[in-house]
Amino acid sequence: MNSRYSWSMLLLATVLIVGSPVWGQGSKPLRLAPGETGTIRLVAASGPLDNPLKGWCPYTDAGPIHQPYSMVFKYISWRELEPTPGDYRFDEWEATWDQGLGRDRHVIFRVYIDYPSKPSGLPQWVRDLGVEERPYEVYGGGRTPDYDDPRLLAGVERLIAKLGERYDTHPRVAFIQLGLLGFWGEWHTYPHTEWAPSSDTERKVIAAYRRAFPNKVVMARYARDNAGEQAWLGFHDDMFPEDTDNGQDWAFLAEIRRAGRSENWKVAAVGGELVPGQAERWLGAEYLLTKQMLERSHFSWVGPYGPPLLASQQDAYVQRSEELVRRMGYEFQLTRVVLSRAKPQQLQVQVSLKNQGVAPFYYRWPAQCALLDSAGNIAWVGTTEWDVRQWLPGEHVVAAKWPLDLKPGIYRVALGIQDPWTKRPAIRFANDAPVLNGWTVVATVEWQGE
C-alpha cells in the first residue's frame, strides 16, 4: 500500500476516534497545541472562470473579448520562424505573444506550412531546393508542398527539434498542436486527398514531436493512422460540437474510439474550436448537445473561435458560457481540511477534495501549504508530494506533514498550486474562501507553545 495513503488513513482514524472539533471558515481560530487535531469544513461556491490552462482561448488579435479567459492561440508559419536555414526567429515571435489579448496569458500554438488564403508558409530556401508545390483554389487558394519530399521532411524534423529545445520546458506554453502537415496544419488536404502526406511521413513527424516534447502535451487533429496509435497524444476537434460525435464514422470521437484512444484524455488534453461563427446556435437552441459533447469528449478548452467573442448580454447566453467553462477541464473543490500537531514541532495536513470537471490538470505544478501571519505575509511554505495530474474527476484525499519550528501566534493556513511561469499560486478552488495573492485561506489557527 502507498505509504502516503496509509498515513492519510491513520490520521483520519485518529481524528474520528478522538472526536476532534469541527470549525467553519468563520469560526474563531482553531487551537493547535501539541497533540491536538481540528477539522475544517469548506463552503462550496462556483468555480473561477479564468483558472489556468482551461476555458476560452482566443487569438491575441481577436478584438474585444467579453468573458474571462486564461490562454491565447497563436499560429506561426515555418517561413516566419526560419526565414533562412538555421536562423530561428523565436525571440521575434515571442515578442508578439503579449500583443492584444495575449498579455499575461498562457499560449497554445500551431506551426503551419500551408494555410489556405494566406501567403505560403514554406520558406523560400526550401522552395529553392526544388520541392514541388501544387496550386489550388479551394478555401481561398494556396500552394501545397510535397510533404514526402525528403528535403522538406529533413527541414521539418530539424524545426521540430529546435521547437522542443525552446518550448518543451517553457512555462508559458500550455499545449502544442502537431500542425505543419496539410491545410491549416490539420493533417488533411481534402478534397485533394492525393496530396496528403504518406503514412511514413506522418510517422516520422509524430516521432520527431515525441522526441522534442517529452514534457508538453501535444495534440493531433485526428486519431487516424499513426496518430491513432499513440497513447500519449491529446486531440483537438476544430468543428466542435457539430462534428464531435454526429453518428458518422469520420466524426471526431468515432475515430478516437476506433483507434482505441478513448482514455487518452486522462494523460493529454482534448480541446478545439467551436464551429466558426455559430456561437449563438450552439449556446442557444442546441446548447444541451454542446454540453453533452463537451462532457463526452472531456474538453479542456475552446478556441480560437468561441462564445467570448460575441458581445451578447442575454442572461442565458452568459450563464451557459460560464457553465461550460466551469465544466471544462478540471474544477477542484475543497471539502474538508484536517490539521494536526501530533508532535510539538510538526504540522500535519489532510485535504479532501473533488474534481468537478471532466478532465484532470495535465502538468505537475507544485502543490503547497503556507502559513500567513497577521499582516498577510508568508511565515512559512511547505511543498507537498501531491501529484495534481492524478486528480481525475471524482473525490480524492491527500496528506502531508512537515517539521515546523514556529513562533506561537495566530496564522492563516492556505493552500496553493504554483504556476511555474509566474512563481505564484494560480489554480483557485471552487470554494467560498478568502484568496490572498493566489493562496486560498482554509483556516485560521492559534499555534501554541509546547
Image: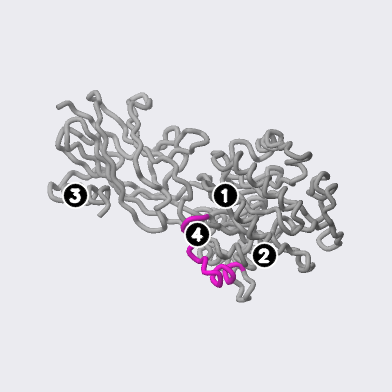
**Residue position for label 3:** 10
Question: Which quadrant would residue 373 be assigned to in this image?
Answer: top left
**Residue position for label 4:** 265
- Residue type at mark 4? Trp
The answer to whether mark 4 and mark 3 are in CB contact below 8 A is no
CA–CA distance in space, label 4 to label 3: 33 Å
Q: Quadrant of the N terminus?
A: bottom left
| x and y, in percent, of residue 54 in the image | 53, 50
Q: Pointer 3: residues within 10 angstroms few (<14), some, or many (20+)? A: few
258 above or below 365?
A: below
Q: Secondary structure at mark 4?
A: helix
The answer to whether residue 285 is seen in the rendering is no
- Residue type at mark 2? Ser
- Residue type at mark 1? Arg
The numbered dot on residue 199 is 2
Q: Secondary structure at mark 2?
A: helix
**Residue position for label 1:** 211
The answer to whether mark 2 and mark 3 are in CB contact below 8 A is no
